[in-house]
Amino acid sequence: MEKNRCGWSTKDQLYKDYHDNEWGVPNHDDTHLFEMLNLEGAQAGLSWYTVLTKRENYRKAFDQWDANKIARYTEKKIEKLLQDPGIIRNQLKIRATIGNAKAFLAVQKEFGSFDKYIWQFVGHKPVLHRFKSLSQVPAKTPESDAMSKDLLKRGFKFVGSTICYAYMQATGMVNDHVVGCWRYEG
């Protein structure tokens, strides 16, 4: 029997797996949090499906999201990434990822972990919404506004409020599974 899922996730098995196993699940692993922040930024202007299909390629291209390595990327490495058909070859997004690695490392140093920093925007616990339909899910919230403003102040790029809200959903900071979805935990 097919599980009842949020409407956006029924396109194919890749979306179903992402919906069932990751989206809305609280995550506190710094490497995963860094990966998702950059993937959400890479998605800007594109579909999330496009990014999901390239996710494994991104992991290979960006050294399994090792921020220490990414922060040291050279112009030669950037040129190599711009030729990689397995990722989105947008120079601004690639350079943003390198800058984000530097900012990420600074946040880790200041707070002890990126997790401690980023989860403060939701009071260190997931926000559970009770939306009955996808049309009720906001594109941004006061929390994503605050996150975006602070990330930008710290030098992060491609972190507007809408991207931050999608990031919050992706990392389980907010759980926007609609009432009726098997993943809804009301």
Image (cartoon, helix red, strand yellow):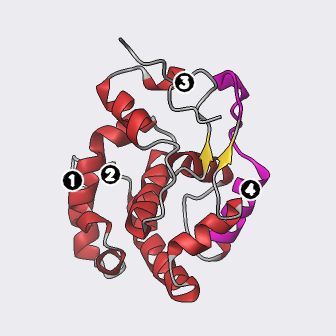
Q: CA distance from mark 3 to mark 1?
A: 37 Å
Q: Residue at the location (71% across, 32% down)?
A: 130
Q: CA distance from mark 4 to mark 2?
A: 30 Å
Q: SS for tag 4?
A: helix
Q: Which is nearer the N-term, disc 2 or disc 3? A: 2
> Is the residue marked by circle 2 packed among few (<14), some (14-19), or many (20+) residues within 10 Å?
some
Tag 1 near tag 2, CB within 8 Å: yes
Q: Is residue 135 left or right of residue 29?
A: right
Tag 4 near tag 2, CB within 8 Å: no
Q: Residue furthest bottom?
A: 109
Q: Which residue is mark 3?
A: 181
177 part of magenta stretch? no
User: What amino acid is labelled 3 in the image?
Assistant: Cys
Residue 150 shows which numbered tag?
A: none
Nearest the viewer among 157 and 136 is: 136
Q: CA distance from mark 3 to mark 4?
A: 24 Å
Residue 143 shows which numbered tag?
A: 4
Q: Which residue is mark 1?
A: 84
Of labels 2 and 3, the one closer to you? 3
